[in-house]
Amino acid sequence: MSDDMIQLEELTKRFPGQAEPAVDRLTMRVPRGEIVVFVGPSGCGKTTSLKMINRIIEPTSGHIIIDGEDVTDVDPDELRRGIGYVIQQIGLFPHVTISDNVATVPRLLGWDKDRITARTDELLEIVGLDPDLYRDRYPKELSGGQRQRVGVARALAADPPVLLMDEPFGAIDPITRTRLQNEFLRLQEELKKTIVFVTHDIDEAIKMGDRIAILREQSHIAQFATPEEILTQPANEFVEDFVGSGATLKRLKLSRVRDVDWLTDCPTGRLDDSPEVLRQRLADSDWTALLVLDDRDRPVRWLRAPDFHHPAREVARMGLPAVAFVRPQATLSDALEEMLVGSAGVAIVIDGQGVYQGIMDVDVIIASIQAMRDATNEFYRAAKLVDPTTGLAGS
């Protein structure tokens, strides 16, 4: 079995009446189980290149090889049934239920009813939508973020090895977008699909991609490398300009909360603890606030010393609601954003069930940035640099 799931060889698209090709001899390999992001300026051909992979747009010349098979000339409908496809506007069928939307491809493949029902419910669970609540609803009854989750579920319905995503989170508000990005990365850890992902946003590319292809006009590759390499070793001036300033902050998108070994543990209490017990616990600590957990260890409230001036109040009504949550798959950039908007100046780390894991503060972010700088400096001292366009070691 090849390590490459997708191979594009001299892939070219010429549209009638155009003097120059929209895509000119694009050649690249997409490793099995990785997310490869196409990013570049508007009009560079990234979406055209993506659509040629499942032949929504037919290539003028060149070859598309998927899992060792040249699919350039196979039946395009058959090809598309084996490739998941997620677009920015989602494209759900408005007049059928959510479960019927998700079941579209399995029905085309002739699955039996029980298998389709089981798969639909399984996928709704996977993308965080309770089947009992959502399977019989219609797209108009869902929020934009929920509809996008259904779009992902539909793309995964037949368990395709390859997933194509064309700016899937581009039309969603920033907060929902961040949450969906993190949720999708969590899914990818489990599913290990081979994904080609198109975006115009370099920050999203850095966060989502195992590898990034920065494309110039006609889908000429300016650099194809890991996010770390692109930030620390841009191949040329075009890449430097496209990545832009603030590389240090962008590198916070490369590290995830789960990679941090030095989470802080703040003083905690329970909703059923008495105010006096909680007040004493806070007084005995070096912290200015205490985090109250419910009976399932989920954060509920922040309490500070002044909140105990009215001991007759119930603990559940004291202090401020706990906000600014991050999960292990979130990036340090996500954590920093949560710190800035949260009431306590920290991010609360929780697991997939919302259970408290620890606290991240600005000191953790600073230490992580320093660790990245030290690692980069060590690389330059200890290793010969590799030419990012040829892959050959420099002198």
Image (cartoon, helix red, strand yellow):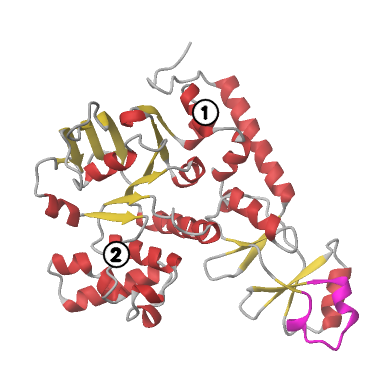
Secondary structure beneath dot 1 equals: helix
Secondary structure beneath dot 2 equals: helix
Q: Considering the image in quadrants, where does the N terminus appear?
A: top left
Disc 1 designates what residue?
Answer: 241
Name the quadrant containing residue 94: bottom left
At x 69%, y 70%, the residue is 322
Name the quadrant containing residue 306: bottom right
At x 75%, y 82%, the residue is 317
Going by the numbered disc 2, the residue's amino acid type is Arg
Judged from this view, the residue extending furthest toward the top is 395
Judged from this view, the residue extending furthest toward the bottom is 312
Name the quadrant containing residue 93: bottom left
Residues in magenta, as a range = 303-319
79, 364: nearer the viewer: 79
At x 78%, y 69%, the residue is 290
Could you tell which of marks 2 and 1 lies nearer the N-terminus? 2
Q: Nearer the viewer, mark 2 or mark 1?
A: 1
Disc 2 designates what residue?
Answer: 154
Is 307 in the magenta?
yes
Q: Residues within 10 Å of mark 1 (few under 14, many from 20)?
A: few
Numbered circle sitting on residue 379 = none
Residue 235's spot in the image, x, y percent? 46, 23
Is 85 in the magenta?
no
Residue 181's spot in the image, x, y percent? 47, 55
Residue 150's spot in the image, x, y percent? 35, 67
Q: Residues within 10 Å of mark 2 (few under 14, many from 20)?
A: many
Relative height, residue 94 to residue 29 (above, below): below
